Image (cartoon, rainbow, N blue to C red):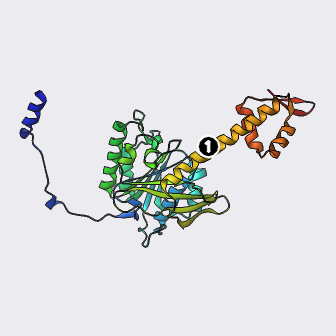
Amino acid sequence: MNDDKTINNNDTVEVDTTPASDIQTQPIVWLYESYIPIGTVTLLFGEGGEGKSFYALALAAAISNGLPLPGMDTPFPASDVIISNAENPWPTVLKPRLEMLGANCERIHRINDGGKRLTMTDERIEAAIRKHSVKLTIIDPIQCHLPSFMSMGRVESMRPILTHLENVAERTQSAILLIGHVNKGRGKAQHRGLGSVDIINSVPSVMYLGRAEGLDRDVRAVAHGKSNFAELAPTQTFRLNKKDGFQWLGENEDITPDDILNYNAKKEREDKSKLDEAADFLLDLLSEGDIPAIEAIELADEAGISKRTLERARQAENIKSKKVNDHWIWHL
């Protein structure tokens, strides 16, 4: 009864409303057409070590020079960029990579924390965007930019943070790109982002980066997994290696976000199977007594087991190694 009474008395509450007829329609402005809209937040997810940060730097380099990104007919005008990267040092990693990518480093900025860790709720982010008329802000990775009292796994923590960043992007008419890791295992892409699924539900555009079946070892794919403002854009690919650096390769429409996220899970299962096979091989070999390490390695090679996998199996099974007359012997 009390609840009903409260509801019935809401006619005394003052409320400000706007009719739809008074709202001015506006077109979507794209920093990177179909992938990264201006005025809101975009997410980039992927496994660790797959090149997410390098990809983000390639975006920054193109934006700083006003160069077209893959799939764009007209480039976004040359603009300033903010990069907040909590995992790589600027002097030895980020700056050399930007230079290698041909970035206009005069247009790329970091926020000096002054001893106070930068978080996604920090007012210095909006202040820096306004100071340099920034159009792209990269925050990498999400978990390193959370306030200490907040958790990625809790909706009540993430929703206010993302809403705050969306408001910052809208007020400054800029794009904010958040980079995050994915959970281990298999499953649909929308459920693989590290933390609450509400992170993906809260933003209009989500991309997934990683390897996929059929690609060369040094090729990565970036698949568009969610878009509230346009049709999903084609998957783009790039090559990343020490010899050639970073190279855009073009579209591959056959690769989906699920293909990318399930690739590593499949490889992990294959590696585990190989490790189990190597462990069984070693235990059988040593069941008859100690064996010289060099002989075990040669026999494993004949059985199609690599030296690296054999060594991992030895450590996993706690097989000891001792030196006898200048030779290493393995024993249980």
Query: Disc 1 on helix, strand or loop?
Result: helix
Left/right of residue 170 with respect to residue 119 in the rendered view: left
The quadrant where residue 26 appears:
bottom left
Q: Position of residue 147 (x, y in %)?
A: 41, 37
Q: What is the total number of numbered labels drawn onto the structure image?
A: 1
Q: Amino acid at mark 1?
A: Arg
As displayed, is residue 286 above or below residue 304?
above
Residue at 73% across, 35% down: 279
Q: Quadrant of residue 329?
A: top right
What residue is rendered at 41% in x and 67% in y? 76
Q: Is 224 or 276 nearer to us in this picture? A: 276
Q: Residues within 10 Å of mark 1 (few under 14, many from 20)?
A: few
Q: Position of residue 207 (x, y in %)?
A: 45, 55
Residue 40 located left or right of residue 289: left
Image: 303 above or below 219: above
Q: Quadrant of the C terminus?
A: top right
Quadrant containing the N terminus is top left
Residue under the image location 31 percent in, 55 percent down: 170
Q: Is residue 167 above or below residue 29?
A: above
| Residue carrying label 1 | 269
- Image location of residue 178, percent across then percent down: 44, 50
Residue 113 in view:
no
Furthest-right residue in this view: 325
> Of 290 and 203, which appears nearest the observer?
290
Q: Position of residue 216 (x, y in %)?
A: 63, 60
Residue 323 seen in this snapshot: yes
The residue positioned 64% from the left and 56% from the top of the image is 217
